Image: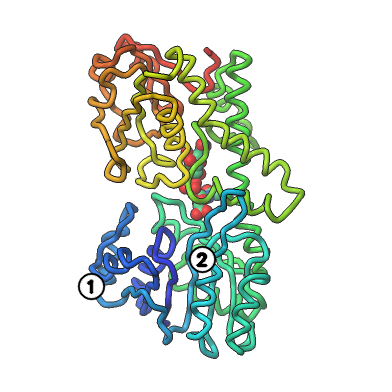
Amino acid sequence: MKSICVIGIGYVGLPTAAMFASKGHRVVGYDLNEKAVNALNKGEIIIEEPGLGDLVKEVVAKGDLTAQTTCPDDCDVYIIAVPTPINEDKTADMRYVESATRAIVPHVRKGNIVILESTSPPRTVVDLMLPILKETGLELGEELLVAHSPERILPGRVLEELRTNSRIVGGINEKSSLEVKAVYESIVEGEIFITTSTTAEMCKLMENTFRDVNIALANELAKMSEELGVNCWDVIKMANQHPRVNILSPGPGVGGHCIALDPWFLVEKSKNAKLIHQGRLNNDSMPEFVENKIANLIGGLEGKTVALYGVTYKPNIDDVRESPVMHLANSLKAKGVDVRICDPHAGEKLDEDFDIYEAPKGADIVVLGVNHDEFKNVDFTKLTEVMRSKIIFDTRNFWSKADVEKAGAKYVLLGDGTM
Ligand code: SAJ
């Protein structure tokens, strides 16, 4: 059993720390955020993720997971799981990775392992971390083992995916890769692939980029379909019957802290990332596209009321980071729209949150931004009877046209070719 320090106890670090602790390792979460540290030491969590609350409670109660705001110095393994946000100019903000690496320098000893889990631009380990870690005086790859092992867990399924997904371990040399692989073997049931640190960085970025470019294609299809009078959802359904085609779904844009950001790390580092760049621009254009459709449907925006269902970046989570629907809500507000938000998951984080049947009061349109489960079985008669004009705009192909029309309302679907 090892003693492990996880630096950054957020969306990735916390479940990782809890998982290692549940396998008998002694784990210390190190984070500068006092609120997160205090909550963790009480066995509480401040994020919404199925199963995580119970697991954390259990390992904290057993004393296997603790948290502190200073870096511990008696650990065998240091895992860096800090955020890698993006600057205004779309370049990676690597301050947290840099300061986390600097923070461990005085604490690491001969035989320790340093792992970067944060998604980072290619060459981060080699160009940013190694020069800092050299200051330890330890021989890198021999006395101090270093690797990148990107997290690839899907919010909403984090514990399951941590355990069952395959894992990539990119060491600065083979010895590092093998030692780090052994660390993850205690929590990962999937296959663990060994490679170089820069290849591991590229793998992670290309996975999210693959999805981003595919969604960009779906969004472009939605726009073309409206132009050409085709229902893009029919096209996707039938084209995907082909054994080698899998077009993802269009929507109001791509959000979250991963897919909407990671492709920029490639654009920053390579002048050849042209398709990737265009895909980002396509996806970022969707909130505005949806806003223009809303304006067309209700005859302008100023002075209008829009009931907006779901503002998180995807369904059934409370995360509004980089949410395109949040972006849409703010843009509508700036144009003089009274935006009445209903979000059963993120509601507590918002200034104002309406109940499902309260949000549409006096609304000129109901817009489905995110398909939370709570919205599945809404009663459209009850929902639309309090509206000023009965228009339902579904950006996710989630609601039934027949159900909406039965309630005497107009149903409009993003990319259905009717506008
Ligand atoms: N989206 C669409 N259409 C689709 C699918 C998704 O518009 O057909 C949108 C969603 O609404 C959301 C965004 O894309 O706004 C991203 O959601 P997601 O569920 O595709 O992915 P994330 O960002 O929650 O998690 C991704 C995952 N990566 C891949 O599936 C390749 C996850 O495995 C990674 O660990 C995570 O990024 C990460 O941390 O990098």
User: Label 2 sits on what residue type?
Assistant: Tyr
At 38% from the left and 72% from the top, the residue drawn is 29
Q: Residue at x 58, y 44 (%)?
A: 211
Amino acid type at circle 1 is Ala
Q: Is residue 311 above or below residue 262?
A: above
Rendered image quadrant of residue 10: bottom left
Q: Nearer the viewer, residue 30 or 147?
A: 30
Instruction: Pick out the residue farthest to the top.
Output: 408
Residue named by callout 1 = 61
Q: Nearer the viewer, residue 271 or 211?
A: 271
How dense is the environment of label 1, judged by Cα within 10 Å: few (below 14), some, or many (20 and up)? some
Query: Where is the N terminus found, in terms of image quarters?
Result: bottom left
Residue 415 numbered mark, or none: none
The residue sitting at 27% across, 26% down in the picture is 359
Residue drawn where x is 36% and y is 28% of the image: 308
Residue 163: percent from left, percent from top: 43, 62
Q: Secondary structure at mark 2?
A: helix
Q: Nearer the viewer, mark 2 or mark 1?
A: 2
Label disc, if present, on residue 96 of the rendered structure: 2
Depicted 52 relative to depicted 354: above or below: below
Occupied quadrant, residue 354: top left
Q: Position of residue 119 (x, y in %)?
A: 56, 59
